[in-house]
């Protein structure tokens, strides 16, 4: 319902609606129902690490929905200088995926978890490093209460963009790739703010396209061409090595 997400719309109504969202069952939950044990000698299922990212939404000055993003530190060993959602790998003390996303957001950008209303999770995705990433959608009711404190070791910039841009074909390029035997599209969105130019692409862009589709209840204006990758298997001998 466009009236629930347009400028000036009631955030409480949006929260209520998003809490009704139920993501598709994850193919990466290693339960007997989803991933039954293989036959003897057939191999063992690869057990990936888990991570969670926060899709933190708030109202901009014009009433539009915006999402908080970071530009990763150029000194990081992986994905250095890339745009990302705040978040990271799960730790043993995390109660659930939401706890992971909120803890990492506080560590990376100084976002107090008490300011965020968690409303739903989205479909799990598998990164190229075989990390299962769980997007958590949260609402920041008052952006003025958020005082960004970037962790210099992890984050170079904190910025925000309109969520709806990920449904539009403007400022978007794409290229088709193949991985694990499946063809899929990598989307790139360019965004300029305060004399800075950002490129939002790959896994982050894919999560935000899906998040925008759920929030605005409509598909993007372009062919998304998503793929669901299967976890690899290894022979028993390799798994024990």
Image (cartoon, rainbow, N blue to C red):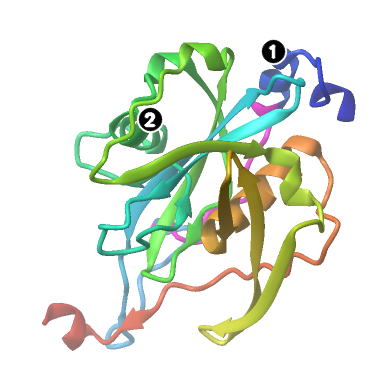
Looking at the picture, tell me which residue is in the foreground, 33 or 211.
Answer: 211
Which residue of the protein is positioned furthest toward the left in this rendering?
Answer: 241
Residue at the image point whose x is 54% and y is 54% from the top: 204
Residue at the image point whose x is 47% and y is 50% from the top: 84
Q: Is residue 111 visible?
A: yes
Kindly state the secondary structure of the residue where label 2 is placed: helix
Q: Is residue 184 above or below residue 55?
A: below
Residue at the image point whose x is 65% and y is 56% from the top: 190
Q: Earlier in the sequence, mark 1 or mark 2?
A: 1
Looking at the picture, tell me which residue is in the foreground, 214 or 8.
Answer: 8
* Segment tinted magenta in the rendering: 18-30
Location of mark 1 (residue) = 12
Residue at the image point whose x is 58% and y is 44% from the top: 195
The spot of residue 89 in percent (x, y) is 30, 49
Kindly state the secondary structure of the residue where label 1 is placed: helix
Q: Is residue 103 above or below residue 129?
A: above
Location of mark 2 (residue) = 102
Looking at the picture, tell me which residue is in the foreground, 216 or 49.
Answer: 216
What label sits on residue 207 in the rendered view?
none
Q: Quadrant of residue 9?
A: top right
- Does the magenta-highlighted stretch encompass residue 29? yes
The spot of residue 100 in percent (x, y) is 34, 37
The spot of residue 109 in percent (x, y) is 36, 32
Q: Is residue 39 visible?
A: no
Q: Is residue 59 above or below residue 129?
A: above
Q: Is residue 127 above or below residue 94?
A: below
Mark 1 and mark 2 residues within 8 Å of each other at the beta carbon: no
- What count of labels does the image hold? 2
Q: CA distance from mark 1 to mark 2?
A: 20 Å
């Amino acid at each position: 319902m466009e009236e629930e997400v347009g400028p000036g719309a009631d955030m409480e109504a949006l929260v209520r609606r998003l809490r009704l969202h139920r993501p598709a069952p994850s193919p990466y939950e290693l339960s007997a129902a989803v991933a039954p044990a293989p036959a003897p000698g057939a191999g063992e299922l690869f057990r990936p690490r888990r991570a969670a990212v926060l899709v933190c939404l708030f109202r901009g000055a014009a009433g539009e929905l915006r999402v908080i993003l970071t530009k990763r530190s150029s000194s990081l060993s992986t994905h250095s200088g890339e745009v990302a959602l705040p978040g990271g790998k799960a730790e043993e003390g995390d109660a659930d995926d939401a706890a992971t996303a909120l803890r990492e957001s506080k560590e990376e950008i100084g976002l107090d978890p008490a300011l965020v209303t968690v409303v739903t999770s989205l479909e799990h995705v598998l990164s190229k490093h075989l990390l299962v990433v769980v997007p958590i959608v949260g609402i920041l009711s008052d952006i003025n209460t958020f005082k960004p404190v970037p962790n210099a070791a992890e984050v170079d910039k904190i910025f925000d963009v309109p969520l709806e841009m990920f449904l539009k074909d403007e400022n978007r390029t794409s290229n088709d790739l193949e991985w694990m035997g499946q063809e899929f599209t990598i989307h790139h969105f360019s965004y300029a703010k305060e004399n800075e130019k950002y490129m939002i692409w790959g896994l982050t862009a894919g999560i935000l396209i899906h998040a925008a589709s759920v929030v605005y209840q409509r598909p993007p204006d372009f062919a998304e061409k998503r793929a669901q990758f299967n976890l690899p298997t290894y022979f028993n001998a390799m798994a024990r090595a």
